[in-house]
Image: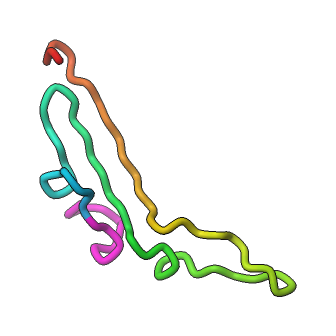
Amino acid sequence: MRNSWLPSAWAQPCEGYDGFLKTGSVWSVCVRHSEPERIMPPFSIFGWKVPQLPDEIRGEAKIRLYGAGG
């Protein structure tokens, strides 16, 4: 996250992670933002709000390490 293009105010750690990383036989990285409308403002077309944003935006990636068991 230190060298990421992602502004630090946008990235919030996910619950259950040590910062943005979880390690073990499966390594995971997770980043989220709890207020999507602050970074992706909704817009309207003919008075109809597009898009309907979720309560939270979350990205997570996992990789299983070869020979790590589990």
User: Residue at 33% across / 73% down in the picture?
Assistant: 7
Question: Total label count?
Answer: 0
Picture layout, residue 13 above or below residue 49: above
Q: In this view, does 3 lie to the left or right of 53?
A: left
- Expressed as whole percent of the image width and height from the top left, the position of residue 38 reads 47, 82
Question: For the view shown, which residue lies furthest in the right direction?
Answer: 46
Picture quarter containing residue 10? bottom left
Quadrant placement of the N terminus: bottom left
- Expressed as whole percent of the image width and height from the top left, the position of residue 5 reads 35, 66
The colour scheme used here is rainbow
Q: Is the magenta stretch mostly helix, strand or loop?
A: loop
User: Residue at 30% across / 77% down in the picture?
Assistant: 9
Residue bounds of the magenta highlight: 1-12
Q: In this view, does 69 lie to the left or right of 33?
A: left
Please tell me which residue lies in front, 31 or 16: 16
User: Residue at 36% across / 62% down in the picture?
Assistant: 32
User: Residue at 20% across / 63% down in the picture?
Assistant: 2
Question: For the view shown, which residue lies furthest in the bottom direction?
Answer: 47
- Expressed as whole percent of the image width and height from the top left, the position of residue 36 reads 48, 73
Q: Is residue 8 left or right of residue 33?
A: left
Quadrant placement of the C terminus: top left
Picture quarter containing residue 41? bottom right
Please tell me which residue lies in front, 1 or 14: 14
Q: Is residue 3 magenta?
A: yes
Q: Is residue 8 magenta?
A: yes
